[in-house]
Image (cartoon, rainbow, N blue to C red):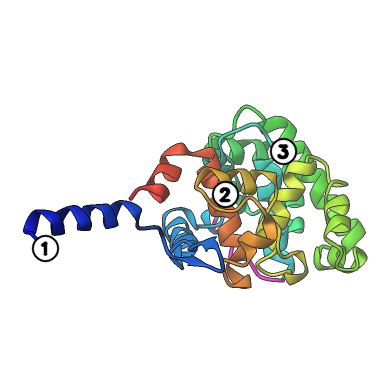
Amino acid sequence: MSTAAKTTKTAKSAKTTKPKTTKGRAAPRAPGTKRDRVRSLLRVAGTTYAADAGIRLADKPAPLWQLLVLSNLLSARINADIAVAGARELFRAGGRTPHGMAELTWQQRVDALGRGHYKRYDEGTATRLGQCADLVRERYAGDLRRLARRAEDDPARVRDLLTEFPGIGPTGAAVFCREAQAVWPFLRPTLDRRALAGAERVGLPSDADKLAGLVPEDELSRLAAALVRVDLHRDLADEVTAP
């Protein structure tokens, strides 16, 4: 066979070659692609909001109270970084426990929020935080673990009980549960509408169970926070999806 004929035969073979299939189906995508993206996501945006606010989250009364305060601040239509800064200032002023928050005067709470530039909602939030401190002490003896017990470890019931606190609506309850799943395993997986929107933005499954399968259980709170961040900040999403 001439060289030209061999070349023509090779070209035809290249054109007709099909991807390998498994039992008549197209070959699966390269393994680990989604997990690689999740690793990138956690590296770029995987700091929880609690950690940002200086909360050493644990299944203990003080850090759970601090998470409630942060969830209250994040419930408002305000930049999340400002809410985190406001929480830090409140804790610095002495509001790290329900008793400490109750001991602060209304003006001291307003001033702390102002130092964190949480100014648009400062007065109303200062009032609500005082009411929350009173309610936690009266209903749960200052210990939100009692709320989990009252809810009988039912995530939907936890969210309902959280919304009884002034300033905590569905958004605040979702924030609390996303973060608290780190220490309350019965909340797992908590990946709400905002987190699922973030997953879709970076090309990950928009199904909570499928997403949860991509990380160890104790990483779910970081995953949830990261997904919320990429939904809020397109530049982070672009960094995660960059080649």
- Which disc, if any, is residue 126? 3
Q: Amino acid at mark 3?
A: Ala
Q: Amino acid at mark 2?
A: Ala
Q: Which residue is mark 2?
A: 199
Relative image position of residue 36 (x, y in whole percent): 43, 63
Question: Is 174 left or right of 33, judged from the image as shown?
Answer: right
Residue under the point 72% across and 38% down:
126
Q: Quadrant of the N terminus?
A: bottom left
Q: What range of the chain is rendered magenta?
A: 54-59
Question: Is 65 left or right of 111, judged from the image as shown?
Answer: right
* 164 within the magenta span: no
Above or below, 7 against 62 in this view is above
Q: Amino acid at mark 1?
A: Met
SS type, badge 1:
loop
Residue nearest the viewer, comparing 137 with 231: 231
Residue under the point 65% across and 31% down:
77
Q: Which residue is mark 1?
A: 1
User: Which dot, 2 or 3, sits closer to the camera?
Assistant: 2
SS type, badge 2:
helix
**Tag count in the figure?**
3
Marks 1/3: CA distance?
89 Å
Relative image position of residue 33 (x, y in whole percent): 45, 62
Residue nearest the viewer, comparing 5 with 20: 5
| Pointer 1 local density, CA inside 10 Å: few below 14, some 14–19, many at least 20 | few
SS type, badge 3:
helix
Relative image position of residue 92 (x, y in whole percent): 57, 53
